Amino acid sequence: MYVAPAYAQTESEAPASEAIEAGTEVPHDANGAESGFPPFETSSYPSQLLWLAITFGLFYLFLKRVVLPRISGILEVRSDRIAQDLDQAARMKDEADEAIAAYEQELAEARGRANEIGQQARDTAKAEADAERKAAEAELERKLADSTARIEAIKSEAMGEVGQIAAETTGAIMASLVGAKPTKAEIEAAIGRARG
Amino acid sequence: MANDPIHQFHITKLVPIEIGGLDFSFTNSSLFMVATVAAAGAFLYMTTASRGLVPSRLQSITEMSYEFVASMLRDAAGSQGMRFFPLVFSLFMFVLVANLLGMFPYFFTVTSHIIVTFALALLVIGTVVVYGFWKHGLGFLKLFVPEGVPGVLIPLVVAIEVISFLSRPISLSVRLFANMLAGHITLKVFAGFVTSLSAMGVVGVAGAILPLLMTIALTGLEFLVAFLQAYVFAVLTCMYLNDALHPSH
C-alpha cells in the first residue's frame, strides 16, 4: 500500500533511469526540481525531523515509563527469588545437619545404655551365681560335718562294743580251751593289760 | 523496474502536510519511523507481558538486550551512568530495529538518511553538553584540558580536544548513515547485475550466478552491519556520556 506511490514515481521516472546503464550513477530527475541524491535533499528535512521527534519521543517515553520498569521488575523478582531459594536451601541443609547430629547423639546414648544394661545383667547374674555357689558349698560343708559326726559316733560306739565282744569271745575261748570259766572282771582286766 | 540504486532512498509524500511554509508531510520515511517504533515497542511490551519468572525464548531476547545495553553503559560510564539507561536503550533499539527493517525488500531504511542519524547524534551530544554543564558547571571544560600536559602544549592540546569533541556528532552520524547507505547501494548494484546479466541469454544467466552469490553474501554481511552499527552507536553514546559524568579524565 505504502509502496504504491513509490511505484507510481518509478514509472514516471522510468525514461530518465533507462538512460543510465546499470544505474550506478546518480540519476537526475526529469523535472529537475530536486537534486539527485535523496539524503541531501534539504526539502525533506523538516518532515523527517518532525516525525523522528514524534516517533522517537514517544518510543523513549514508552520505554522509560512502561517497558524498562517492567523488565527491571522481572529481573529483580528473579534475583530475589533465587536469593530466597538459596537461603531456604542453606536453612534446610542446616536442619538436616542438626537432625543428623541429634540422631548420632541418640545413637551414642542408646549404645551407652545398652552397654550399661548388659553390664548390669552380667553383674546380677554373676552375683546370683556366686550366692548359689556359696549356698551349695555351705550345704555341702554342713553335710560333711554331719557325716563326720555320725562316723565319729558310729566309730566310738563300735569301739565300745569291741571290748565287750572281745571279753565274750575271750570267755568263750577260755571255756572251750581250758574249760574254766573266768569271771567277767578278770577277763576285762586281762584284756586291759593286753591292750596296753 | 528501475535499476537505480539510489531510488530506494527516495522520500515520497503519503499525506501532504504543510505548516508555515515548511513541508511536514507524512512520508514513507515517517511511516517506517512509526513502524520501527511500533515493532520495537510491541516486541518489548508483549514479550514481557507474562512477567515469567522463567523467561520464554522471546522474553529472554528482551532481557538479554536489556542486560546487554545495561552492562555496556555500566562498563563505560559506571553506575552513575545508569540514569541515562532509558536514552541509550531507546537509541540502541531504535537504530537496531530501523536497520533490520531496512533489510526487507521494498522497505525504506530510516537510518540511511543523514538528517535522521545527525539528529540522533545531536541528541546524544546535546545531552552530554547540557548534563555536563548542569552537573559540573564550568568544571566541564576540564574535559578539554587533559592532566599532566606541559604548559607549552596546552593550547595545542586544547585545540585538538575541541576539534575532536566537535567532530563527534559528525562522525557518529556519518558512520551510521554511510554504512547503511553504502550497504544498501552495494546490495542493489549486485542484484541489478543479476537481472541485467540474466537478460542477456544463456551465457548471461551463467554469468549472473557470481553476482547472485555476492548478493547473498552481502545480505548476510548487511545483517551483521545492521546490528554492529546499532551497537557502535550505543557504545559511543555510552563513552560520550561518560565524559559528561566524569569530565576530568
Image: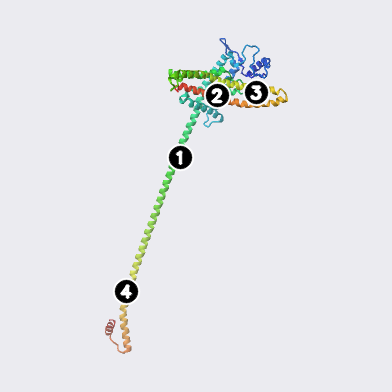
Q: Chain of mark 3?
A: B
Q: B11 or A185: nearer the eye?
A: B11
Are the residues tagged 2 and 3 within 8 Å (C-beta)?
Answer: no
Could you tell me residue B175's position as x and y percent? 56, 21
Amino acid bearing label 2: Ala
**Which mark is drawn over residue A153?**
4
Where is A124 relative to A4, above or below? below
Amino acid bearing label 4: Ala
Are the residues tagged 2 and 4 within 8 Å (C-beta)?
Answer: no
Circle nearer the viewer, 2 or 4:
2
Could you tell me residue B245's position as x and y percent? 46, 22
Q: Chain of mark 4?
A: A
**Which mark is drawn over residue B190?**
3
Quarter of the image for the N terminus of chain B: give it. Answer: top right
Task: Give the colour scheme shown.
Answer: rainbow
What residue is pinned by disc 1? A93
Circle nearer the viewer, 2 or 3:
3
Circle nearer the viewer, 3 or 4:
3
Could you tell me residue B20's position as x and y percent? 56, 10
Q: Seen in the image, is B39 located left or right of residue A12?
A: left
